[in-house]
Image (cartoon, grey):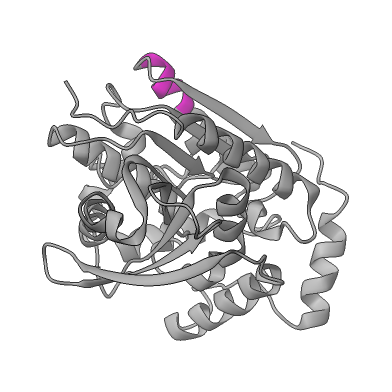
């Protein structure tokens, strides 16, 4: 078992002093869990780094659900700016763009790309594949309408954390299967890629000692996928998908996370499919650690790694139809 980072005790003390705790949807109503999640994530979300401009836009999914978009520009004087479409985490059921705003602003500032935060509909109000449809609508908006907002749809990456990493990867797979234009790059942060609760990391870290629990992961899946048999659908659980033909991926995992083996297993499968990728496991830190960049040095190191990879991969337009 990985040793805990020395700053985690201080982080826990800050949360206790503020009177906030991570959401526990197993003991709270859904509304209470959403309030708790926003309060806890909000503690680490401030102060917000200054970006040059923030804009809002909207699109609509094929099933007619509205999708709000919030765009963070590192430099509004530039046009044809490369873009990262970002899907927030929260088990498909919690959080929003505002809970992840600090992370998105830092990615924009450090990579030079505009970051588009996607306010997809939360589960269970909408279930699989509804959120995937909304993710695809956001990507289609960036390619078709992004130029009006100064965005370069030919230099587009997709990314997200936890459930958002699932959506980013699943959307890329759906585009590949449709023989559509692919993103240039995927940024996958401690993703929720399968419903398998029996992995070594679930056994080691799923009991609640480090935040996220296996039982909460199971609850999140029950909100997202109505039919239990669909938990193995490769677009719901992309760890089990055919991964051939994907663009380069950066997979970041947390050493004290019950979902760590989702990322490690995905990296193994990317290697088998000969997809260019990097796996970085940050030891001693829990799930969602990159939210804690105001207090946790590894969070800043991981954001720097992600931003550098975005900058490298978005310098050359690689989006093209899968062959």
Q: Is residue 61 or residue 81 the one in the foreground?
A: 81
Query: Residue at point 49% right, 62% down?
Result: 72
Above or below 258: residue 138? below
In the rendered image, the quadrant that contains the C terminus is top left
Asked if residue 289 is positioned above or below residue 313 in the image, the reply reads: below
**Left of 301 or right of it: where is 160?**
left
Residue closer to the observer: 310 or 206: 310
Relative image position of residue 200 (x, y in whole percent): 57, 35
The residue positioned 54% from the left and 56% from the top of the image is 75
Q: Classify residue 31 by image quadrant.
A: bottom left
In the drawing, does residue 37 fall left or right of residue 119? Answer: right
x, y (%) of residue 57? Answer: 32, 70
Residue 94 in sight: no
Q: Residue at x 80, y 48 (%)?
A: 297
Task: Single out the residue that lies furthest toward the front.
Answer: 77
Type of secondary structure dominating the magenta stretch: helix
Give the extent of the magenta segment. 267-272
Residue 99 lies in the magenta stretch: no
In the image, taking residue 195 as reference, residue 5 lies left or right, namely right
At which x and y percent is residue 158?
A: 39, 45
């Amino acid at each position: 078992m990985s040793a805990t980072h020395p700053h985690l005790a201080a982080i826990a003390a800050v949360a206790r002093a503020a009177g906030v705790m991570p959401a526990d949807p197993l003991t709270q109503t859904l509304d209470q869990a959403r309030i708790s999640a926003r309060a806890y994530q909000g503690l680490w979300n401030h102060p917000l780094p200054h970006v040059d401009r923030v804009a809002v836009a909207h699109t609509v999914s094929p099933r007619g659900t509205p999708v709000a978009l919030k765009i963070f520009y590192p430099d509004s004087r530039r046009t044809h700016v490369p873009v990262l479409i970002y899907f927030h985490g929260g088990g498909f059921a919690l959080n929003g763009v505002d809970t992840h705003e600090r992370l998105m602003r830092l990615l924009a500032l450090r990579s030079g790309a505009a970051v588009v935060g996607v306010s997809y509909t939360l589960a269970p109000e909408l279930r699989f594949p509804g959120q995937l449809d909304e993710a695809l609508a956001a990507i289609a908006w960036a390619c078709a309408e992004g130029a009006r907002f100064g965005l370069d749809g030919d230099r587009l990456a997709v990314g997200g954390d936890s459930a958002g990493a699932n959506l980013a990867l699943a959307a890329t797979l759906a585009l590949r299967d449709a023989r559509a234009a692919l993103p240039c790059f995927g940024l996958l942060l401690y993703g929720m890629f399968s419903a398998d609760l029996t992995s070594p990391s679930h056994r080691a870290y799923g009991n609640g000692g480090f935040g996220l629990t296996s039982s909460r992961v199971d609850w999140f899946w029950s909100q997202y996928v109505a039919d239990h048999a669909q938990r193995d659908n490769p677009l719901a659980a992309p760890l089990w998908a055919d991964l051939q033909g994907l663009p380069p991926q950066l997979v970041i995992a947390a050493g004290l996370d019950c979902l760590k083996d989702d990322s490690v297993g995905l990296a193994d499968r990317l290697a088998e499919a000969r997809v260019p990728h990097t796996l970085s496991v940050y030891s001693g830190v829990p799930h969602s650690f990159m939210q804690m960049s105001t207090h946790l040095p590894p969070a800043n190191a991981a954001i720097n790694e992600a931003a550098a990879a975005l900058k490298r991969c978005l310098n050359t337009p690689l989006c093209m139809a899968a062959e």
